[in-house]
Image (cartoon, helix red, strand yellow):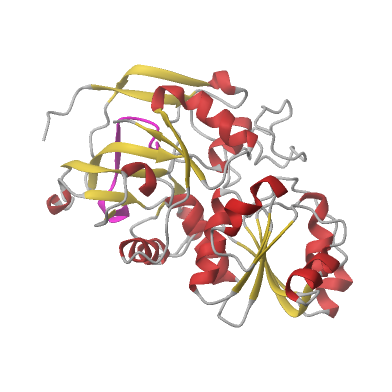
Amino acid sequence: MSAIPAAMNAFVLTGHGEMDMLQYRTDWPVPEPAEGEVLIRVHACGLNNTDVNTRTGWYSKTVTAATTGSGFDDVGEEDPSWGGAPISFPRIQGADVAGTVVAAGKKADPSLIGRRVLVETWIRDPEDPLNMSKCRYLGSELDGGFADYLAVPDRAVFPIECDLSHAELATFATSWVTAENMLNRAKVTDGDTVLIPGASGGVGSALVQLAARRGARTIAMAGTDKHEQVAALGCDAVLARAPADLKAALREAIGSASVSVVADVVGGPQFPSLIDVLERGGRYTVAGAIAGPLVELDLRTLYLRDLTFTGATVVPPGTFGDLVGYIERGEVRPVLAQTFPLEQLHDAQRAFIEKKHIGNIVVTMD
């Protein structure tokens, strides 16, 4: 194993705003693993919406528009992160890490050295791991993987044995664990029909495979130019991204105008129509609002139909380990749209924002 250098390449977020707040550095100090931490040589790191939303400040409640990738002028100083708290700058973003452990700090597991690993995105308080308020997100509350090296607690590191490439492995962490958490929150089983808006994106394409893995029937919604690729993910039917009459589109596709579950990361203007197709006792689970966070809800629909709404952000312990098992057993397959070298992170994020891809975009360090 090669010697660990003193400096590394890294993309550093210096504040909220436009793309110029992301600065490429070739002289950033390599982190030293603290007690209980290991040092990872990062091979690849995937992009996700949190990277964009944190850079632009979209999480702040002062922002009411859809995500566009552009910075906002009215970002609140107190709540610009997923956790409703300020971000400390400079910050290295990137949560979807695939790499190799190259060193271990004091009291860290030395057997991890040399192992190929994925890193859990949620870093928990070791004394209070079930306390969601004490969770920190990789690349938000602590430095992430848009760099050559990353130091993280060894308890967040998962060795993995499979034939997938580093870039393919870097598609999984955020999108797939988010999708699995959504399905867990909605208690999806083989008796459900799951409607998935935004099915061409990272979380959406993961939802299709993970819901199908449970035996559920999956109905995807995506732009017509993406239907062939989305259908190849294994869904039972593909609808337009925003049908003028969603009930009619469902009836034509599956013979029923209702579904038992909506798994949504889109929100925005079509929200009322999504809720309206839920059957009595149906479940709506949400982990994003890329089309807009403020939606119209008729409370009578919610209570008269006995609906259940769940949000899904902080993932319970065990979910990431489950996902690693699915990967190792070949029960799911990556959807890698495109790769960029780390120094082209600006281009990678622009491609991500354009949403012309299917699945996940990844930057590579090798």
| Residue 253 occupies quadrant | bottom right
- Residue 293 lies, in percent from the top left, at 74, 48
Q: Residue at x 60, y 55 (%)?
A: 230
Q: Is residue 181 magenta?
A: no
154 vs 77, left or right, is left
Q: Which quarter of the rendered picture does the N terminus lie within?
A: top left
Q: In the image, what residue occupies the spot 55% across and 64% down?
A: 234
Query: Quarter of the image holding residue 256?
Result: bottom right
| Horizontal and vertical percent position of residue 360 | 50, 44
Q: x%, y% of residue 310?
A: 65, 66
Residue sitting at x 42%, y 62% = 332
Viewport quadrant of the C terminus = top left
Is 366 rendered above or below residue 35?
above
Q: Residue at x 48, y 56 (%)?
A: 176
Compared to residue 8, the image places residue 268 above or below, namely below
* Span highlighted in magenta in the image: 142-157
